[in-house]
Amino acid sequence: MQNIEKQKFLWGSATAAYQCEGAWDADGKGLGEWDVFSHGNPLNINGATGDVSCDFYHHYKEDIDMLKAGGQNTYRFSISWARILPNGRGAVNQGGIDFYNRVIDYCLKQGVEPNVTLFHYDLPEAIAKEGGWENRAIVDAFAEYARVCFTAFGDRVKLWVTINEPKYYAYCSHMVGNYPPNHRHDFNRYFTTVYHEAVASAKAVAIYHSLKLNGSIGIVHDSSNVEVAPDTKEKERVHMIADLFYNRIILDTACKGEFPGALISLLREYGIDTSYIKFEDMLVFLQGKVDFLGLNVYNRFYITDYSAGETEVFHNNKGAGSNAKEGIRIRDWYETAIDPNTKRNLWGREIYPKCMYNTLMEIKERYGDIPVYITENGHGCYEKPNDEGYVEDDERIEMMQGYIDYMLKAMEDGCNVRGYYAWSTMDLYSWVNGYEKRYGLVRVDFDDHNRRYPKKSYYWFKKLIEDYRKAEEE
């Protein structure tokens, strides 16, 4: 594990390959499941694709330059599996290797630390056709892919992430049904997917450590701090079930090398298949403990007792065009509670900055002094530029400032936070939300050759970083 005790705090921003690269079929890249989904699936409700997006593939120098000029000293991005291995395994595409070498080398030339994620939702279509993460074969395929990347880039990349948000990826793919392969309310597929992701991640971590590279490797979890509403009758039971469902299936395996045994009995009690859980994987988990934990912090899970009705997932991909509030009801387990005193964004998600503090302190309490990076935090908005292309995104600034303040408080209270990444570096493709939902610190004019315009939040973030560094030096 790399000794990063003396490194300065990392302030940066983040993207993901399919969301920003474009060049979907360039230079030998294979087909991805999102290419197939966005090109013709009727569930792609906004009709948008990532074919071009903000064209990071051809604008990477401009984006890294702008990031550096904004005071950021790190950039988190993901590798497209199909760009490296067009068929998911086997033949390596040199064109893909060359592209990421250019990005990594340019980051380092500009003094920007690359933080690289192996899998951020974009499965090669060849693997998806085999059943994707439901098929046990993916564990070895992912291990092969990880080894190729570590060998090609590990001499320069010192921060690695195996999988971005394994739980949320499985949740959207098999519970909400808005991500391919678009299954709804399918607990068997959901838990099979999450389990295989956990095993694959642990295998990749063990491979990385065996190569004796001078760096650190972790996993990124979408923070799911569970809070129980005050009038809940079965507080302990509801909290335990939700915490197993949202958090411990990922965090216990990654941080402690232990699969939470309580989950197995819970699944069997609910009639969910557990045949994919193998005894030999327990050693894999032990050998594949992460060096750090990445947390994507947006909201808490505020829940109460199950009341009535069948399992239902409430999700909003239509923004202001829908009144849906994000949440879930799981028959006999629990359901989302509505806090009337908490704001929600236009997509029905709570804006609750204190969840940053609560999440971080809970991690410290459970997993000790493990290094933590806030690998995503941001705010999706509808935005209108002025005549000069400038966006005054005060709503984003207010929201992010609240979360950062709580992060700094958690650091004061002993949580080992090493860095913070704003989501996102620039406007990009927001999955089935298309391009109307914008997260970027930099505006992209998708109708004018993808011209970049720093937003008000870009300058706010730059000053925040400068002020933090000044205080650090005093």
Image (cartoon, rainbow, N blue to C red):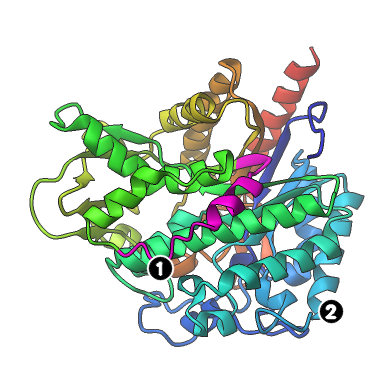
Secondary element under disc 2, as helix, strand or loop, is helix
Residue shown at 37% from the left, 38% from the top: 300
Quarter of the image where the C terminus is located: top right
Q: Which residues are magenta?
A: 273-293
Whether residue 277 is in magenta: the answer is yes
**Of the residues shown, which amino acid type is indicated by label 2?**
Gln
Q: Does 320 appear above or below 300?
A: below
Residue shown at 79% from the left, 81% from the top: 93
346 left or right, relative to 136:
left
111 left or right, relative to 230:
right
Q: Which mark is residue 173?
A: 1
Residue shown at 31% from the left, 58% from the top: 320
Secondary element under disc 1, as helix, strand or loop, is helix
- Dot 2 corresponds to which residue? 94
Q: Which mark is residue 456?
A: none
Q: How busy is the neighbourhood of tag 1: few (under 14 within 10 Å), some, or many (20 plus)?
A: many
User: Do residues under tags 1 and 2 come within 8 Å of each other at their CB atoms?
Assistant: no
Instruction: Looking at this view, name the residue that lies furthest to the left.
Output: 308
290 left or right, relative to 199:
right
Residue shown at 68% from the left, 52% from the top: 205
Whether residue 366 is in magenta: the answer is no
Quarter of the image where the N terminus is located: top right
Residue 368 location, quadrant: top right
User: In this view of the protein, which residue sits in the foreground, 65 or 107?
Assistant: 107
**Of the residues shown, which amino acid type is indicated by label 1?**
Ser
Q: CA gap, disc 1 to disc 2?
A: 31 Å
318 left or right, relative to 332:
right
